[in-house]
Image: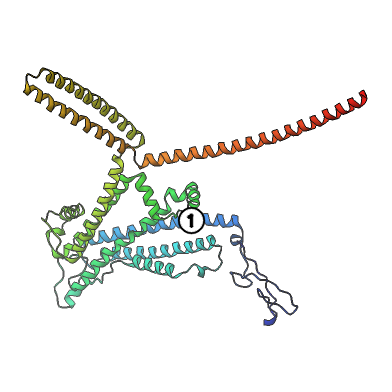
Amino acid sequence: MEMTTRLAHLDTKVDGRNCDGLVNHNGETTDIRVPLSHTGKRLSPIEGGNLYRLRDRKFLLEDKKRLCAWALGTALLGILLMVLHAELCPVVYQPGSIYALSINGLISFSTGCLLILIIAFHYKDIRLFIIDHNQVDWRIAMTSNRVLGISLELVVCAIHPVAIYLRPDMEDRLGGKPEQNSSTPLCLSSSHKEVMLDVELLLSALMFLRLYLVHRAVLLHSKVLLSASYRSIGSLNNINFSFRFVLKVLMNKYPARTLLVFIMFFWLSASWMLRLCERQQRVETGGMDTALWLIAITFLTVGYGDVSPHTSCGKVVCLFTGVMGVACTAMLVAVMTKKLALNKGEKHVHFFMMDIQISKRIRHAAANVLRECWLLHRTTQTKDNSGEHRHHQRCLLEAIRVFRHLRLKQRKLRDYASEMVDLSKMQMIMCDLSANWNSSYHELEQRIISMEQKLDELGRSFQITSELLTQALHHRRLDHR
């Protein structure tokens, strides 16, 4: 929508300005339109034309998708470098060596590139917001929530371990011994305090927060968002294409694959974080195999008690693993229930065959009741063997009980067959029948109206014919006279 303005001359006084509902010196009322841009700013073709805006919007979406993919790749590269740095140092190379400084520099460089990509992504997002809302000033898009979200993303992406490395000869200058076969849990020299180790441990674990970019990449690269049909139907039904909607679509289309990928990735990452937390205590949970076992039994909420975390960081990791295990178990139960449920055709076939089988058993039970009645009647007529009479009475009561039980089972089966799906289907059928009846009723009304019109025309024709006959008879009488 293009806003037009009707501006006064620059040398016009305040009394001569045209305002909505005000009168100028000439006594004429004029209306103005409030511009969204500054006075004298000229609209570009991209801001003015719909075709240009659509083209620019398409390019911006492609740029956002590309920047998000690059940002996710850079974040994963930083996490992999951090893991490699924590595993190799000080086992392969010592703190302060050129290898440690190189890998630490690469981590910092990837973090800087990630921050630049995040800023570029939000720049494209702001431009897209301006085009979608037909605005000109970019400051309109900078709301408090957007500023807070961008700041939080930059803080999260800027977190990475930055160690203060000492040269190997610094220990001699400080009066200590040089490091030989250092066994510190992180790539730090032995002169660092325990607080520094905790800070490096916390920064290394918090680097996994960069994985929030996964949901953004999934959203921007999903077929749901890229499909014009999805967007058209969704806009008609007021559907917000967020990550929650995309996740629901993925869980409905590929439930097993989605859960398997999430569980495997969470299992490996949580096991490594637990190993990183427990490694400083040099306990059995500091090994990767024991950490994998502990995370697995905690995720499955089994808890054998053979191993347990010893540090506060490890306890927090296990607590979060238990919560995620309960959530994934609930989703797995829902998926399995949906997979094992019968569809409409299978359900109708199953219930139909069960109904036939129960009907056969009911007929057999009714025949047994009649047979036992006849045998009881025959023993009653003889009146000789009272034991046989009581036996047939017991058999008759048992046959009646079986017959009633089968009738009740058939009634329950028919009740189970009428579920909400069938009721909704019946409701749709009734709606279609009602629509057909309404259309037939309207057609019948039109036919009745047309018949009334034809009857009126026929009545008028009869009246005109009778008048003509009367006139003809009158003229004939006159001629006869």
Q: Is residue 208 left or right of residue 428?
A: left
Residue 456, position in %: x, y?
A: 71, 35
Q: From this viewpoint, is residue 165 visible? A: yes
Q: Is residue 291 above or below residue 183?
A: above
Badge 1 density bin: few <14, some 14–19, many ≥20, Cα 10 Å: some
Q: Is residue 259 left or right of residue 284?
A: right
Which residue is at a point 38% across and 41% down the rendered structure image?
Answer: 423
Residue that numbered label 1 is attached to: 61
Q: Is residue 431 above or below residue 81?
A: above
Which residue is at a point 7% across and 23% down the rendered structure image?
Answer: 386
Residue 96, position in %: x, y?
A: 24, 68
Which residue is at a point 70% across and 72% down the rendered structure image?
Answer: 30
Image quadrant of residue 271? bottom left
> Which quadrant of the rendered structure holds the N terminus?
bottom right
Extreme-front residue of the structure: 481
Residue 360, position in %: x, y?
A: 26, 25
Looking at the image, which is closer to me, 441 or 288? 441
Image quadrant of residue 131? bottom right
Residue 397, position in %: x, y?
A: 15, 29
Q: Is residue 100 left or right of residue 114?
A: left
Asked which secondary structure carries label 1, the reply is: helix
**Number of on-image labels:** 1
